[in-house]
């Protein structure tokens, strides 16, 4: 569908599982050069993508590290010549403990902010020079549907994902003169084995709140991200897109 994505270099953080893996598969199938980034397992994912005919490299990196994020950008440019798209997907989520705001461990609060707020900033900062040099690019930040509905006992995660909205709008205004778009995508709850174990019955409750009453799956998030990465979305920036089956509307 998006032929202009062929040969484009796409950096995906948190690429090895869930939504990130769906993004990696989709961009690989679209003919993009995929730079898979995660704490571990990135090169194994890249090898699998190459086995499917895609061009890909893997870089294990901590997105909260200045040096690590700069190394990701350097590896991408060294291998593919430039960077066209950044998907800030890495998130501190499964390690979040549900508790009242008075009882949140300050260290856990800091870890959540480090990955979910500092991480997108550092990754965007790292790829910006390559995008500025070519006068084009797309940065796509992954937020959460929890921002719109509010979730009790989840304050640090919801707060960190809310930051994505202001980050997106401000960064869009800073980078617009360079032909770089910045947008946010907010997925709804997507269950997996881990979440089924730790939040039994939650998916059924979430489905009941949706207009489209079915389970959300990673592939549901692919279409909007491919679109925002493409030339067809070149006049869209600073916006937030909810992909939630109509659970919340704006």
Image (cartoon, rainbow, N blue to C red):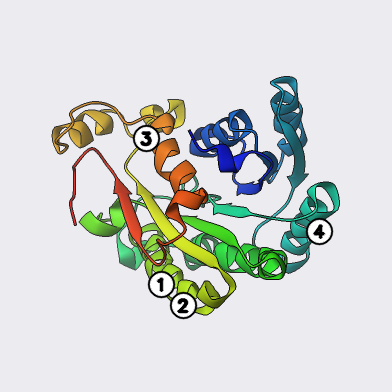
State whether residue 21 is above or below residue 37.
Answer: above
The label shown at residue 190 is 3
Q: Between tags 3 and 2, which lies in front?
A: 2
x%, y% of residue 131? 66, 64
Of 19 and 84, nearer the camera is 84
- Helix or strand or loop: what does disc 2 sit on? helix
Q: Which residue is mark 4?
A: 74
- Helix or strand or loop: what does disc 1 sit on? helix
**CA separation in Å, label 4 and label 2:** 25 Å
Please give left or right for residue 77 compared with residue 131 in the image. right
State whether residue 55 is above or below residue 133.
Answer: above
Of 168 and 196, nearer the camera is 168
| Other-residue count near label 1 (Cα within 10 Å), few / some / many at <14 / 14–19 / ≥20 | some
Please give left or right for residue 204 compared with residue 146 in the image. left
Q: Which residue is mark 1?
A: 169
Question: Are dots 1 and 3 in contact, CB under 8 Å?
Answer: no
x%, y% of residue 170? 44, 77
Q: Between tags 1 and 3, which lies in front?
A: 1
Of 15 and 97, nearer the camera is 15
**CA separation in Å, label 1 and label 3:** 26 Å
Q: Earlier in the sequence, mark 3 or mark 4?
A: 4
- Helix or strand or loop: what does disc 3 sit on? loop
């Amino acid at each position: 569908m998006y032929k202009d994505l062929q040969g484009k270099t796409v950096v995906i953080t948190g690429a090895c599982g869930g939504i990130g893996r769906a993004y990696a598969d989709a961009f690989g199938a679209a003919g993009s050069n995929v730079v898979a980034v995660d704490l571990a397992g990135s090169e194994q994912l890249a090898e699998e993508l190459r086995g499917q005919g895609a061009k890909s490299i893997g870089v294990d990196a901590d997105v909260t590290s200045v040096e690590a994020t700069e190394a990701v950008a350097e590896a991408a440019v060294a291998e593919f010549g430039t960077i066209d798209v950044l998907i800030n997907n890495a998130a501190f989520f499964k390690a979040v403990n549900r508790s009242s705001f008075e009882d949140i461990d300050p260290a856990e609060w800091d870890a959540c902010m480090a990955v979910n707020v500092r991480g997108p900033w550092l990754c965007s900062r790292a790829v910006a020079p390559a995008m500025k040099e070519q006068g084009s690019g797309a940065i796509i930040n992954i937020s959460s549907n929890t921002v719109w509905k509010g979730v009790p006992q989840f304050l640090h995660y919801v707060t960190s994902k809310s930051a994505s909205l202001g980050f997106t709008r401000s960064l869009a205004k800073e980078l617009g003169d360079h032909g770089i778009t910045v947008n946010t995508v907010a997925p709804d709850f997507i269950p997996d084995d881990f979440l089924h174990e730790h939040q039994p019955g939650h998916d059924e409750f979430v489905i009941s709140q949706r207009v489209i009453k079915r389970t959300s799956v990673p592939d549901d998030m692919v279409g909007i991200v491919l679109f925002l990465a493409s030339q067809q979305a070149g006049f869209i920036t600073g916006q937030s897109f909810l992909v939630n089956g109509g659970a919340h509307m704006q």
